[in-house]
Image: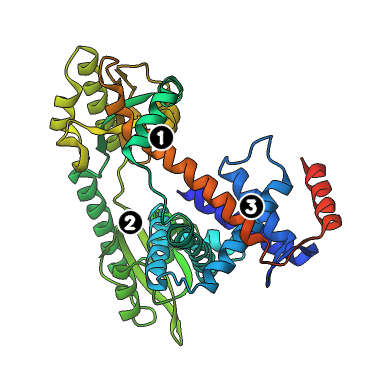
Amino acid sequence: MKKLFISIIIIVSICSLFAKKSDYIIAKVAKDIIMKSDLQRQIFQMKNANMWNDEMTVADVLEDMIVGKIILARAKEVGIKPDENKIRNIVDTQIKNIKAKYPDESTFYSDLRQANMTESDLKQYYFDTINEQQLQNQLVQTHINKNIQVSDKEVESYYSEHKDEIINQYKVYKISLLLRNVSASKETIDNAFAEITKVKNRLKAGEDFKTVAKEISQCPSGQSGGDLGWFSRGMMVKEFENAAFKLNIGEISDIVKTDFGYHIIQLDDKKGNEIRASHILILTTPNEDDFERENEFMEGIYNRLNSGEDFAELAREYSQDKETSMNGGFLGNFTEQEFPELFREEIAQIEDNSFSLVIQHDNTFYIFQKSELNNEQDFFTTYKELTQRILINKKQNENAKNWIEQVKKEYYIHIFEDRLNEFIEEINRTN
């Protein structure tokens, strides 16, 4: 997640810098415009998300952006209004999830400062992006594809005509999983509390806060004596913020517990609604022993699977995923194209009717099972829903294409070909 977040910062900050240096209009669409920096950002995002391939051209990307602007314009014309409060909640959750991947909030804000951004800038970027997506999605759902239906007869007929193609291209697998989360053991948490208690006693005995922070703190800010800089309410986790804002200048807090660990805070200065504080942090996140303990446990389950024990029974007994464990770890039936994106490669590499090695991602260990559906089953029953989706998608694409071609005639569209060619030359020079 942190890698994704840094990529977003790069996208926003690079394109902001790009805009300041040599930006210009590449296309006009109705009352809107597409700048060189907009096109640059879109290409950067696509490459960053592995959505770019050698067959794509800059002109194709621009055409998609023009279509997006048209859909956006029509959505506003017909009065579609996304729920802004819902979008803000989505944004707040996204920012919270990003922060949670950092060892502490000071590192999060340090990355923002390096990108010459504020948290408000990042929130606004997310808000604008999600708002546009929801406007477009709601128009497509309510005005373009609202009347698309397929009958059982159409599904049966399409399946009958394309049976071999569907089965070969969309082979369906039953995917199951067994997962275990790595959490800090009671011993790890107790040791952290014992450590922060020693720190508290040293400070009570008169030792210098910043000297102790440099020696003990497990936060990157420890290198600068625990200094977190200036911040206002809403910028730190609630428990930390409440304790910090109650302090007087020079006062040292009691031990404060947050999701990051145990803190001791010193208020360094106060100015209006902002304060400057330092802290000493002892982390309560899982340590190497916790990871090793859970890894050994999962390796033991893997060995039991190799010995012939039933995956479903082991998943029911040991998996910590509440949604799937009660069903023997059953995650769903998927085609290769539909495998969970995060583990698509690992699942694809599993031999049919077998299971993966132990896979670690962040603080979780996984074992996946991939089972080929019995070829003797009634394939139409198995593939009916998939065939229905294929047919609906086919109709939606045809409907959307016709709608877009018709609506494009109603809007003013002008592409500055010379500027587009100049931009393409710049792209080619940098590749």
Q: Distance of mark 1 from mark 2, alpha carbons? A: 35 Å
Q: Disc number at residue 289?
A: none
Q: Amino acid at mark 3?
A: Asp
> In what element is the residue under mark 1?
helix
Q: Earlier in the sequence, mark 1 or mark 2?
A: 2
Q: Are marks 1 and 2 in contact (CB under 8 Å)?
A: no
> In what element is the residue under mark 3?
helix
Q: Is residue 266 left or right of residue 29?
A: left
Q: Distance of mark 3 from mark 1, alpha carbons? A: 24 Å
Q: Disc number at residue 64?
A: 3
Quadrant of the rendered image containing residue 85? bottom left
Q: Amino acid at mark 1?
A: Glu
Q: Earlier in the sequence, mark 3 or mark 1?
A: 3
User: Which residue in the structure is indicated by mark 1?
Assistant: 338
Classify 201 as above or below 168.
below
Classify 349 as above or below 396.
above
User: Which residue in the structure is indicated by mark 2?
Assistant: 260
Q: Is residue 174 in sight in this rendering?
A: no
User: Mark 3 or mark 2: which is in front?
Assistant: 3
Q: Residues within 10 Å of mark 2 (few under 14, many from 20)?
A: some
- Can you give x and y, in whole percent of width and height, for residue 90 in the image? 39, 63
Quadrant of the rendered image containing residue 222? bottom left
